Amino acid sequence: MDQREIDLWHMRRALELAVQGQGHVEPNPMVGCVIVRGAEIIGEGWHRRFGGPHAEVEALRMAGARAAGATLVVNLEPCCHLGKTPPCTNAILKAGISRVVIAQRDPFPKVAGGGIARLEAAGLEVSVGLLEDEARQLAGPFLKLITLGRPWVIAKWAMTLDGKTATRTGESRWISSPESRAVVHRLRGRVDAVMVGRRTAELDDPLLTARPPGPRTPARIVVDTRASLSLESQLVQTAQDSPVIVAVGETSDPAARARLTEAGCEVLVCPGETPAERLDALLAKLGRRRMTNLLVEGGGQLAGSFLDAGQIDEVHLFLAPKLLGGAAPTPLAGEGLAHMPDALRLDRPVVEQLGPDVYIHGRVEKDVEGEEPRMNADERE
């Protein structure tokens, strides 16, 4: 086995470790690290929680004195700035690491090549770019937040074989199986917010909570241009227990906004004359709050607006072996795309069986590379 094959094997392990931080570390990126001597791993770690030790520090602690002269393999450039934790470059140099293999550079303004430069200036051998595509896939939500100032948008829906998300009378409970719904709750438990439109909130009267709870407690967002969400809805009734954000238009009734605020909801006024403009304003507000992952659960008009705006990054589809027919709702409304070559495609979609349902999920083919960072240098720890 040559050196490149050994490095590939270790980088794959670093990526496996990094995923374990999902839902715990955001808005920071998921990072995994291994310390190795030849083919032997002598230390490994991952970023476990926001504000906690970084992956490099965890791995160095496990390796102990054996780290001197060893190789460090990590999926993201080590930080060189003081945040909630000291710079990882300092720990690497202190441990006596002689070689560092990095999958991708960190676009965060306080790092942005500085970590690599610091290590090289100290005489370490540094290699960058191994499994970079895989690392960028993993870091997609972090990269979008850094470069575009917007959260990563996960579109989720359940539908029948004939593409319906409810009956012609609006009933949707339950299209999908208990096994599928358990996956949805796990998704909710790792995101920063779960979003529905006002019509879905009215018809389904959902709670939008994760049951059982996950590593994050998502804010529950209702896009409600007129501020007409019922004060008797489960969302409003539980606003004191879990955050509820109502995104309204500038022309909404101030008295209606006040009633929602008094009931415990947060009202966000989103400027814009068109739905697309208001949606962009809302995403910008969520990005400034450093929300990294947003789960959009419906309805079709809201999801279609995200599609029209090119803001869907990931799809989770639960296909039930049922038929409804008729003029029932579909998962994506909006204007839609005019030409087949413009259709969104999933990159390497995964297909699974969940009870009687088929579960299809994957990320949308697109790249944010080349954008200038929009997150301020003091907005990440």
Image (tube, helix red, strand yellow):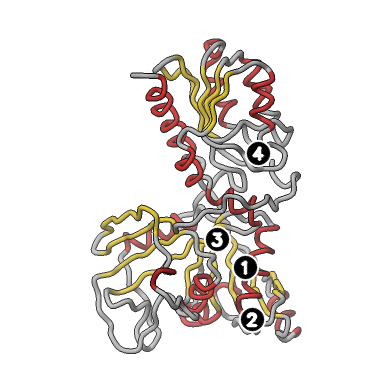
Label 2 element class: loop
User: Which residue in the protein does label 2 denote?
Assistant: 274
Nearer to us: label 4 or label 3: 3
Position in image of residue 237 (x %, y %): 59, 73
Nearer to us: label 4 or label 1: 4
Circles 2 and 1: CB atoms closer than 8 Å: no
Residue at 70%, 74% (x, y): give it.
270
Q: Is residue 233 above or below residue 142?
A: below
Mark 4 or mark 1: which comes first in sequence?
A: 4
Disc 3 to disc 1, C-alpha distance: 14 Å
Disc 4 to disc 3, C-alpha distance: 21 Å
What is the crowding at mark 2: few (fewer than 14 residues within 10 Å), some, or many (at least 20)? few
User: Which residue in the protein does label 4 denote?
Assistant: 51
What is the crowding at mark 3: few (fewer than 14 residues within 10 Å), some, or many (at least 20)? many
Q: Amino acid at mark 3?
A: Leu
User: Which residue in the protein does label 3 denote?
Assistant: 294
Residue at 70%, 84% (x, y): give it.
252
The N terminus - image quarter: top left
Nearer to us: label 2 or label 4: 2
Q: Nearer the viewer, residue 213 or 315?
A: 315
